[in-house]
């Protein structure tokens, strides 16, 4: 394979969430074909995506290795800048101190309006967030996650109503999520959870009413002076949601495996 083919496959794996696989592939390409700025960038991005201190250190090594040979590569410079902007100034003062130099170097190489300049602006906006902006962004992320889970639940409910799912491409993430959910919810013991997923809104309304009624009944009968025991009715719903989340993780693993299989078959054909 060529450097470009390795880079394209890294991009596909990265997009599917296969960060470990993308790193392994980038390292294989660098070992087989020698240094390449794009592969160093994908190696760094796949480490940085893990958002852990050890991986950030490995990402920095990758960017530095690439920039040592291609000091003006904008892809590496912008990716390194994003990493440095994320760094804690107290814990990693050296990394944070490189921001100004990288900004100046990128400004000289990337004209206004270029994709690289736009990425720099976006990264600077992110780094300059205040406390309330952080709160709003976390709230927005939580709403997005809930919306994705609700959409996934609706897809699973439709498949349950139809008695199954039509065949789909193995790299179709949405279809893979539904297939995984149907597997995890199969069997007689999962029937109550299937019912909750199929009638999600009604299940939440009914559970909320049961929780309030239980708490009120416990207080009125003098069993307790204040009750939160009624909220235990939500346990089955939380279990159903955990099944859906587990299905989404399992589906992502399967899609990554399907991408790797296609890559392996293409390599064998060559």
Image: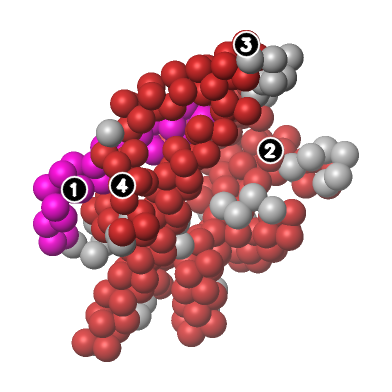
Q: Nearer the viewer, mark 2 or mark 1?
A: 1
Q: Which residue is mark 3?
A: 220
Q: Which mark is in front, 3 or 1?
A: 3
Q: Where's residue 85, x and y in %?
A: 68, 38
Q: Earlier in the sequence, mark 4 or mark 1?
A: 1
Residue depicted at 69% across the width and 40% down the height: 86
Q: Which residue is identified by label 4? A: 194
For marks 4 and 3, the one nearer the N-term is: 4
Q: CA distance from mark 2 to mark 1?
A: 44 Å
Q: Earlier in the sequence, mark 2 or mark 1?
A: 2
> In the image, which disc is placed on residue 159?
1
Find the magenta span and give its range. Answer: 141-168
Q: Earlier in the sequence, mark 3 or mark 1?
A: 1
- How was the colour assigned to the protein in this rendering? secondary structure
Residue 85: mark in rendering: 2
Q: Residues within 10 Å of mark 3 (few under 14, many from 20)?
A: few
- Do the CB atoms of the residues marked 4 and 1 lie less than 8 Å apart? no
SS label for mark 2: helix
89 lies left or right of 11: right
Circle 1 packing at 10 Å, graded few (<14), some (14-19), many (20+), is: some
**152 falls in the magenta region:** yes
């Amino acid at each position: 394979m060529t450097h470009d083919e390795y880079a394209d496959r890294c991009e596909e794996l990265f997009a599917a969430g296969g960060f470990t696989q993308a790193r392994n592939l980038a390292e294989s390409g660098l070992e087989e074909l020698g240094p390449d700025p794009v592969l160093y960038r994908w190696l760094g991005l796949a480490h940085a995506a893990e958002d852990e201190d050890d991986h950030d250190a490995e990402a920095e090594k990758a960017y530095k290795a690439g920039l040592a040979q291609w000091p003006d590569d904008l892809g590496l410079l912008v990716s390194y800048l994003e990493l440095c902007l994320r760094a804690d100034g107290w814990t990693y003062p050296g990394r944070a101190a490189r921001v100004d130099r990288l900004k100046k170097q990128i400004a000289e190489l990337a004209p206004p309006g270029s994709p690289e300049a736009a990425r720099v602006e976006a990264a600077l906006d992110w780094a300059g967030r205040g406390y309330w902006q952080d709160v709003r962004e976390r709230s927005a992320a939580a709403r997005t996650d809930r919306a994705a889970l609700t959409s996934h639940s609706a897809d699973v409910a439709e498949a349950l109503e139809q008695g199954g799912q039509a065949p789909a491409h193995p790299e179709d993430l949405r279809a893979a999520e539904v297939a995984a959910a149907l597997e995890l919810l199969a069997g007689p013991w999962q029937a109550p959870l299937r019912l909750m997923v199929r009638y999600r809104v009604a299940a939440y309304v009914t559970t909320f009413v049961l929780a309030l009624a239980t708490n009120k009944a416990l207080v009125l009968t003098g069993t307790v002076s204040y009750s939160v025991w009624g909220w235990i009715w939500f346990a089955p719903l939380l279990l159903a949601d955990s099944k859906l989340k587990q299905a989404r993780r399992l589906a992502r693993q399967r899609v990554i495996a399907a991408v790797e299989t296609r890559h392996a078959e293409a390599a064998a054909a060559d």
